[in-house]
Image (spheres, helix red, strand yellow):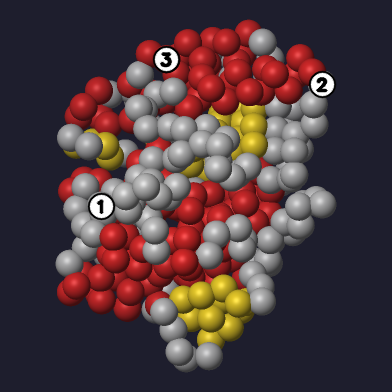
Amino acid sequence: MLCLRNGVFIVDRHDVEFPCPRVNHSMTVTTPDQQGFPAIQRAARLRLLQMHYESKVGHIGGNLSCLDAILFLHHFVMQKDDQFVLSKGHSVGALYIALWSIGRLTDADLQQFHKDHTHLAGHPVSGWMPEIAVATGSLGHGFPVAAGMAMGKQIQDQAGRVYCLMSDGEWQEGSNWEALIFATHQQLDRLTVLVDVNGLQGFGSTKEVASMSDLAQRIAAFGATVREIDGHQAQALQALLQTPQQGFQVILLNTVKGKGVSFMEAKMEWHYLPLTAEQFAQAQNEVRLT
């Protein structure tokens, strides 16, 4: 069992404790402890697996591929005037776990995941907490909405950035290319788009379903600043997300679907499958040993 108590994660009953660094919502950006972040990642993966196992819900692979980036944003990057849009709404479990890891959701809240009449639905439900400003589910709409939010900040000269996390498969949607034209034309310097490039989607690899190689080159052709990094490493995330950047940018996160669990990694079927009891036990053991 994993819980957050007085700003400290307690892992199982082995008295393993570690601090829970987070951004103070007053709010100044903190410097990540390169030794502390892996502990946050491990605890979050364990709690994500538990939440999905107990609810018998799938979509675990895509949650694990984007979890590290969402954690890093919420612990070390986002300030009180920033907003976050999760375009790949079926990975909302990763967002709930990130909010749990900074104390905004409780274990009791997570136990309501995917139940009837819950706010913690299988896709984000907007309006019930400030950290979830946009409802997403139908893919390809998060980036356009985030662009509109950033435009609003720009017009009104409001503080803060808009961070949008989307999937690589979503670039098969025409709405995102329209949003890209809009974002570059309007020079939306308050917008950062992160793309979870795990290479897999519901019916196969992104190359097999609708090839977009080289995605970075195609996006850059529209005039956007594009950078590619390892989406699981704190050092890589820190180098880009904590360095002030001018103008609209797209960050391609090279990730692994099912990251941290051997039988899930780079396997398309874990876009859908729930965990059996045996798989849950194996996944827990593997994550604990990382």
Q: Quadrant of the N terminus?
A: bottom left
Q: What SS does tag 3 mark?
A: helix
Q: What SS does tag 2 mark?
A: loop
Q: Which residue is denoted by mark 2 in the rendering?
A: 157
* Nearer to me, 126 or 53: 126
Q: Quadrant of the C terminus?
A: bottom left
In the image, what residue type sits under mark 1? Gly
Up-down: is 222 above or below 48? above
Q: Earlier in the sequence, mark 1 or mark 2?
A: 1
Q: What SS does tag 1 mark?
A: loop
Q: Position of residue 183 (x, y in %)?
A: 60, 15
Q: Position of residue 62 (x, y in %)?
A: 34, 47
Q: Count up the numbered dots.
A: 3
Q: Which residue is denoted by mark 1 in the rendering?
A: 58
Foreground tag (2 vs 3): 2
Label 2 with label 3: CB-CB less than 8 Å = no
Residue at image position (44%, 18%) is 176
Up-down: is 41 above or below 62? below
Q: Position of residue 135 (x, y in %)?
A: 46, 33
Q: Marks 3/1: CA distance?
A: 27 Å
Label 3 with label 1: CB-CB less than 8 Å = no
Foreground tag (3 vs 1): 1
Q: Which mark is residue 124?
A: none
Tell me which corner region of the image, top left, top right, bottom left or bottom right, holds residue 51.
bottom left
Q: Which mark is residue 175?
A: 3
Q: Position of residue 35 (x, y in %)?
A: 62, 72
Up-down: is 166 above or below 238? above
Tell me which corner region of the image, top left, top right, bottom left or bottom right, holds residue 166.
top left
Label 1 with label 2: CB-CB less than 8 Å = no
Residue at image position (76%, 57%) is 24
Look at the image and tell me whether residue 197 can be seen: no
In the image, what residue type sits under mark 2? Asp
